[in-house]
Amino acid sequence: MRPLTGFPALLLAITTIAGTTISGVARAVDLSTPEGNLDAFRKIQCSLEDGAPVTFFWHGRAYSRVPGEADKLLFRVEGMNIRHCGTVEDSELGTGFVLRTREILLYMDPKTGEVLRTWDNPWTGETVDVIHVANDPVNSGPFYARSASGREFSLPFSVQNGRWWLTSTIPLFYRNPLAGDYQRYVGGTYHATEMFNFLGDEASLLDDSVSSANTQVGWVRMSSWLPWMEMGDKVGVIYFHTAGLKLEDYEQMSDTMKDEIAANYPEYSAPPPLSDDRPNETSWTYFKKIVDARDEGDDAPGGGH
């Protein structure tokens, strides 16, 4: 099974730490129980209402780090993830939910904010095509209050002054999807770390009359060079520093993102169907599809970006 990256990776990681009961707020969502923790988790990630679309939007910057060089500002970035949840029933595990999402990350000129189509690589001197992230799907679940082994679902909350937050660091190390048959001898692993902060207010989280919790997010990612940069084995990494939030509706995204979706990724105006059972996409598997399509003379997915 391919490891998850991006926001859904957090969904697995934050269930590994014992939860903390929030006090001081009259509530219907009971965080002293695994069922209450599951409801809170669902309200953070999506909505208690089946099929209600939720959009996360974030932006920030991406930098290079090469030993012996000052870090370079490479790109501005904007990202979105559109998602919804659906209730599922299991004869042994009871009631749970699944999360179905797709996501985009745009690379933009660091000075003008224009969405890039090509990029002049300052290390190689080559001009390369920019391939934006367009991962469809990025799904998770099902999640239940208790696992088959009896483990209770809990969230690693920190709470102060009516606010909650969750922090998670997710190291990633697995076989690169672009690796060939002999990579075990010469290397070919994907090495990255994703760092998340989710935070919000207790009131919207614990009030059962509110179907979706007010949520902000911070996302930091450190990884190998992006494949479309064509950096080969040059030493160094790229890192992203961004922040964003769950929007009240899709239209609150930037005009840049909405225009890009309308022009090149129209399916990203809605989440995948709740019945979607396709394998998850990552930026690396997406890049491989584009390269393979180009080699075969076919149209690249997602408008070729």
Image (tube, rainbow, N blue to C red):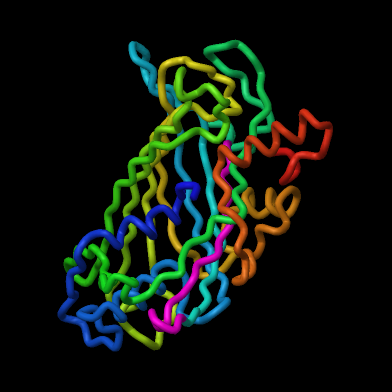
Residue 267: quarter of image: bottom right
Q: Residue at x 26, y 86 (%)?
A: 27
Image location (x, y in percent) of residue 114? 63, 36
Image location (x, y in percent) of residue 208? 36, 86
Residue 263 lies in the magenta-colored region: no
Reply above or below: 156 against 68: below
Reply above or below: 125 against 219: above
Q: Residue at x 47, y 15 (%)?
A: 234
Whether residue 23 sits left or right of residue 200 in the image: it is: left
Whether residue 303 sits left or right of residue 136 in the image: it is: right
Image location (x, y in percent) of residue 282? 55, 45
Of residues 182 and 61, the one nearer the viewer is 182
Say which quadrant the C terminus sits in.
top right
Q: Which residues are magenta?
A: 90-107
Residue 285: quarter of image: top right
Whether residue 14 sits left or right of residue 66 in the image: it is: left
Q: Main secondary structure of the magenta part?
A: strand
Q: Residue at x 34, y 50 (%)?
A: 196
